[in-house]
Each structure stands twice: as structure tokens, then as C-alpha cells.
Image: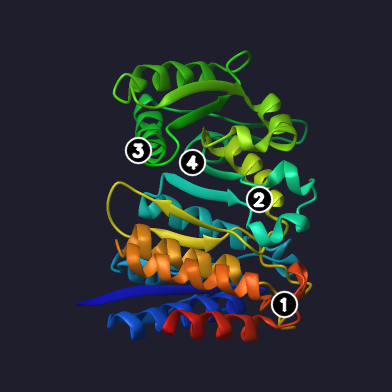
Amino acid sequence: MSRSIVLLPGDGVGPEVTFAARAALEAVAARFDHDFVLAEHLIGGAAIDATGEPLPPETLAACLASSAVFLGAVGGPKWDLAPKRPEQGLLNIRKAMGLFANLRPAFVDPALAHRSPLKPEAVAGVDILIVRELTGGVYFGERTRTATAASDLCSYSVEEIERVTRVAFEAARKRGKRLTSVDKANVLETSRLWRETVIRLSADYPEVALDHALVDSTAMKLITHPKSFDVMLTENMFGDILSDEASVLAGSIGLLGSASLGASGPGLFEPIHGSAPDIAGKDICNPIGAIRSAAMLLRYGLDLAAEADAVEAAVTAAIEAGETTADIGGSLGCRATAARIADRIRA
């Protein structure tokens, strides 16, 4: 059966890491005899330069018709003062595809524990999954601006909270059966609604231990006791901040991937790092986050668990063998690292 996968290289190092993801997917297709139809389309700054829009209609149409979408990265200083920003393309595609749940794993490879900014004994065994609500909250609320004031509305409906909460409970049920819901219920009305809704839905998941934490204390605990978390559920802005904080535990922002999922239709998969324009085109960016995003694409987007396992095993083997980029102690470039991992997948 043919499966259509849209690749959105984007800006900065995006094309380089997209090359790595493509190499991994092609290796999977060869080993497991799949027919993946891979097609590249424009998004972000590259799309603005070519069409004037950060998300051209043809790109969105291709994404909606696909089985899954991989995104490299968007943005860069070139477009900082442009009337349309590359990031609008990312926000708009999430909204148009109905991608309300963002899955952000944060785990530490045993061979790289010494690369973490924390002591190895503090991060050994860390394995967190952050489930972030992606299409509501302050990022999508009404905005006002005058010469002397500005406001951004944070708004959530019960339906929006319920659907992402169920994703988090289902994930916790398959992992360590622990869920931490993060809010600011001591101050914000949206957080009070959030907490009440999560408590009500917890009755449907009696095997999952639920606790609640305020976002500020959670930010501290992620550093002091990161192993105390299993699955973490957050609203949009809190999740944006906490997932970036958690990613640092791994030792390099280039190591981790993410998945953005909706109720139906294709998902969007991307490494957690940005476009890194300062190192773009130098063949030094770490492709592992992109390759792990490809593994998530296989697992969550195409329901190919064995194939995802093969990609993740190849990445782990490459890390243990030191076949990596310089940011985690290796000596290979981006393309060479990707090629070594692709070879391991085929083998």
C-alpha cells in the first residue's frame, strides 16, 4: 500500500535535517518493503520568499491529503521585520490540520547522561512525555494593541481541555500510569476550569495516578527532581516553556523529536529545535531529533510500531558507537551521521 508523506524542509537547518529524516524513511521502506511517496513543499520563510505567503494553499492541500507530514524548521532573522512571519505558517498549519495534542518526549540516553547540564545521577533514567494542548490558549486568543497598551486573551473551552486530557491519560495508561496536570489554578480562571475538567475525566482512568502541580513549582522540580515525572499534561503556553526546559536534560536540543496529532487525519512531526540560521548550511547540525521525529511519524502517523522501533534502535546504536555530530562528542557531519543511522536501519 502506498503512503504519501509530505516533507516541509522550511528554513535554516530545516533542509539539512529533512534530508536526514528522508534518508531514515527511505531506509525503512527498503528494509520493510513499504511504498512511501515523499514530496517536498514550501513553508515558512522559504515560502514567503517564493510566494509571499508562509503557508501557500498548495502546501496545505498536500498536507491535508497526505498520510503524515514532516517539518524541518521555520524562521530566521531575515524575516524578523517582514509583514508576514514564517512562524505564522506553523501556527496556521496546526490549526488547519486540527492538531490539538503535541507530544514532546524528554529522555536521557544512558550513553549521553554525562552531556546533561545536570549531574549524571540526577538524570539517569529520566523519561518524560509532555502532552501540550496546541491550538487554544493565549497563542490563539483575541489580540488588541494601541499606542499605550496591548492584550492577549487566554481562552479555553471544556471540549478543548477534554480532548487533550484524554490523549494524556491514554499515554499514561501505556507508560508508568502516572499523570501530572500542570496549571496555575491559584491565579487563573482558565486553569481552574482546566483542573476541574481533568479531575472529572480521571474517573474514566482509575488505574492512572493523577496529581496536580502549579507551573512555577513544576519548572523548578524539572531541574531538581526530573525523575519524579512520567506524563505531564499542560495548556499551550505552559507546555511550550516546560517542554523546552525539559529538552535541555538530554544534553543537546538536537536529540529529541515531537508529534502533533488531531482527532483524525495526518499528524505533523518535527524536531524540537529551531532553524538555527547561524549554523545553517555548515553540515554540523544534529540530525537525531529529526530522525527520532521520523520514528514518531512511523509510530503515531502510520501505525508502524516495528519500523519505529528499528529507527530508534539504530539511533541508540549510533550514539553508543560515537557515530554522531560534535555537539554530543562525535566527529561526523549531519549528512554522515544520517547516513550511518540509515545504514543501521537497513541492516
The amino acid beneath tag 1 is Ala
Dot 4 and dot 3 residues touching (CB under 8 Å): no
Measured in 3D between alpha carbons, the distance from the residue under mark 4 to the one under mark 3, in whole angstroms, is 11 Å
Q: Of callouts 1 and 3, which one flags the residue occurring earlier in the amino acid sequence? A: 3
Q: Position of residue 136 (x, y in %)?
A: 47, 37
Residue 39's place in the image compared with 159, above or below, is below
Q: Which mark is residue 196?
A: none
Q: Nearer the viewer, mark 1 or mark 3?
A: 3
- 51 or 17, which lies in front? 17
Dot 1 and dot 3 residues touching (CB under 8 Å): no
Measured in 3D between alpha carbons, the distance from the residue under mark 2 to the one under mark 1, in whole angstroms, is 21 Å
The amino acid beneath tag 4 is Val
User: Residue placed at 30% from the left, 67% from the top?
Assistant: 67
Residue 85's place in the image compared with 344, above or below, is above
Q: Nearer the viewer, mark 2 or mark 1?
A: 2
Q: Nearer the viewer, mark 4 or mark 3?
A: 3
Residue named by callout 4: 131
Residue named by callout 2: 247
The amino acid beneath tag 2 is Ser
Seen in the image, is 31 located left or right of residue 296? left
Q: Which mark is residue 170?
A: 3
User: Residue placed at 72% from the left, 77% from the top?
Assistant: 280
